[in-house]
Amino acid sequence: MTRRTGSRGPAARAVPLASLPVAVDAMGGDKAPAEIVAGARKAAEEGIPVVLVGPPGLLGDTGDLEVVEAAEVIGMDEDPAQSVRRKKDSSLVRAAELVRDGAASAMVSAGNTGATMASALLRMGRLSGVIRPCIATPLPRIGRAPAVLVDSGANAECTSAMLVQFAQMGTAYAAARYGVDDPSVALLSIGEEASKGTSLVKEAHGVLAAGAGVRFVGNVEGRDLLPSAADVVVTDGFTGNVTLKALEGALRFIVHTLFDVFRTDDQTTAASEVLLPHLLPIAAQLDPENTGGAMLLGVDGICVISHGSSSATAMHNAVRVAHELAGRDLAALLAGAVGSARAEGFEPGGAPGILGSR
């Protein structure tokens, strides 16, 4: 069934979020629409309500999934803000509008990351009190719940007030998504000492150490991220994105090198037959396809950002995570975390003697 979006108004929010479909940008990503549709269908087969958004004639076999028509597509190389404002009938914008209008519980896209953020922010709006939304990305920890890196790419330039809010929202997110009890929070820096780092890091350290509503455990260095001793690692979006991609590249290099060694000769091939059954489950935990994507924290709704090269497996996992977090009303939990901190005197941009100095 195909339909166009229509405003359903505030009354629609009385409907339990878990009963609403997850809106999937069917045209987002390098492997769209085939892999995106396949992943959405797999999620639907598990009982998760899903609605696809895109040009119906281009989506192929959508099975029994509902399709919300969107005539335009925002390309991976297009300017995020301009494309969202210009292409109002794009699959990304329409997906965000479904969440805004109470017709969907969450949105998922593997498309243009900047445009995904812009769509969510411009259509859903920010949660009350949030300075800037941020991206939370899981960092693997073998045999236990992943840590959360925040911000991993939304804000290249930050204030200490923003870093403090990232810590607050990251704490609420780690608890909601991974069930971590009283998550620990660390700042990413060049040394463990409070005196190390940029002026931004040192200033944020002072605020977090003074309270701010999170369990702050100090600084961590880049070498400590795999595995991270802290449940939430806070940094600015530029540093976070560089860090994340460096880690992804290093892991890819190690895995490829290891498999090349296994093909060196008969002895290494024989050794691989013994080792692979033990290594493959570890590789699965390190594979970004299995993480369910990153989360945009701070907008008034659920927005999952998947990798641009997402396969059907990645999209299936992203839809599952979006559905689960909508059911837990993540947006309300994030608003509560920021609101509680403000009530205790940590106003954005104006914590006594520290945030107000920037």
Image: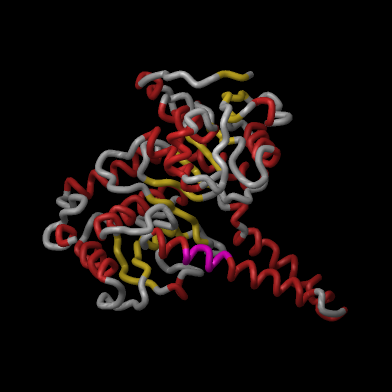
State the residue lying farthest toward the right. 266
Residue at 25% from the left image edge and 54% from the top image edge: 213
Q: Looking at the picture, how far across and down is residue 70, in whole percent?
A: 56, 27
Q: Which residues are magenta?
A: 242-248
Colouring: secondary structure
Q: Is residue 247 inside the magenta stretch? A: yes
How many numbered marks does the figure carry? 0
Q: Looking at the picture, how far across and down is residue 74, in whole percent?
A: 54, 39
Q: Relative to 109, say whether 253 is above or below.
A: below
State the residue lying farthest toward the left. 353
Give 273 or 161, whichever is nearer the viewer. Answer: 161
Residue at 43% from the left image edge and 26% from the top image edge: 16
Residue at 67% from the left image edge and 37% from the top image edge: 33
Give 182 or 11, whichever is nearer the viewer. Answer: 11
Q: Main secondary structure of the magenta part?
A: helix
Q: Is residue 174 visible?
A: no
Q: Looking at the picture, how far across and down is residue 30, in whole percent?
A: 64, 47
Q: Is residue 317 visible?
A: yes
In this rendering, position of residue 229 left or right of residue 282: left
Q: Is residue 52 inside the magenta stretch? A: no
Q: Looking at the picture, how far across and down is residue 171, in whole percent?
A: 36, 53
Q: Relative to 227, say whether 123 is above or below.
A: above
Quarter occupied by the C terminus: bottom left
Residue at 47% from the left image edge and 27% from the top image edge: 98
Q: Relative to 307, say whether 316 is above or below.
A: above
Quarter occupied by the N terminus: top right
